Image (spheres, rainbow, N blue to C red):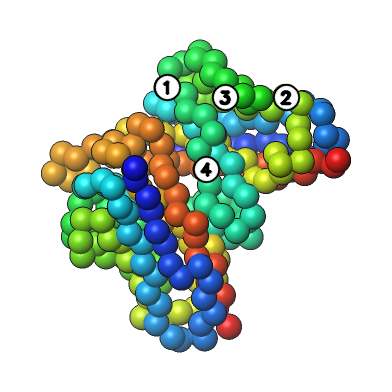
Amino acid sequence: GQQLNQSPQSMFIQEGEDVSMNCTSSSIFNTWLWYKQDPGEGPVLLIALYKAGELTSNGRLTAQFGITRKDSFLNISASIPSDVGIYFCAGQLLGRAAGGTSYGKLTFGQGTILTVHP
Amino acid sequence: SQTIHQWPATLVQPVGSPLSLECTVEGTSNPNLYWYRQAAGRGLQLLFYSVGIGQISSEVPQNLSASRPQDRQFILSSKKLLLSDSGFYLCAWSFGFGGRGYTFGSGTRLTVV
């Protein structure tokens, strides 16, 4: 099946620094998504990318869908303490279940644990 | 607006006991539903997904099963829990093909002792 390599596995940064993390895949995806998970909670969608080469921002977050459709990166500018958490990339591949129903099964990266020191 | 509810939030069960985790979605119809497991706060492993009532697809062989008795209800079960079943279980839903990604519940922390 699809494999996603997310790096780095963890980051320890000072408040105010910029952060960059990325994901690569052995095969293409139709959609790339970035999620953030706070401790003890479910992941929350941050940014969704739908076209190769697309660059999208959400506040201090910027993400790009790689031209080859096999990679994506997420940048966080001017980090703050509440940015702490686990960030997941996810690739989405469209498929079709028995009976013709479409579904978009997500494959997740292993996550990047971000720690921000005040 | 759509909401997803998952319960219980935490659960401690002895080895060999049965399990039933429930997930319900409100504010939409015919959602795609998913069960994920997360070990040690890291990657998410897809266990089951469902595109309709009674339609369950299993992603990995395991000691667990899933059922969808109603359109917006998804249940994760086990007849006899193993120690290795411990983990953080997440339910999620998506519109149709899920082009907007998934929306996750708040999770259930299961500890098998």
Secondary element at image label 4: strand
- The residue pinned by badge 1 equals A50
Q: Nearer the viewer, residue B82 or B4?
A: B4
Q: Which residue is mark 2?
A: A77
Element type at mark 2: loop
Task: Look at the picture and state if B66 lies above or below A8.
Answer: below
- Location of the C terminus of chain B by quadrant is bottom right
Identity, as a three-letter code, of the amino acid under mark 3: Asn
Tell me if mark 1 has few (under 14), some (14-19) or many (20+) residues whose alpha carbon lies within 10 angstroms of its own.
Answer: some
Cα distance in 3D space between marks 2 and 1: 22 Å
Name the N-terminal-most of marks 3 and 1: 1
Which residue was labeled with disc 4?
A44
Estimate how packed mark 2 is, as few (under 14), some (14 to 19) or many (20 or more) residues with alpha carbons within 10 Å. Answer: some
Q: Amino acid at mark 1?
A: Tyr
Are dots 3 and 1 on a single chain? yes
Q: Is residue B37 visible?
A: no
Q: Are marks 2 and 4 on the same chain?
A: yes
Of discs 3 and 1, which sits in the foreground? 3
**Sequence-wise, which precedes: disc 3 or disc 2?**
3
What label sits on residue A58 in the rendered view?
3
Amino acid type, label 2? Ser
Mark seen at residue A66: none
**Callout 4: 10 Å neighbours few (<14), some, many (20+)?**
some
The CA distance from mark 3 to mark 1 is 15 Å
Circle 1 chain: A
Residue A96 location, quadrant: top left
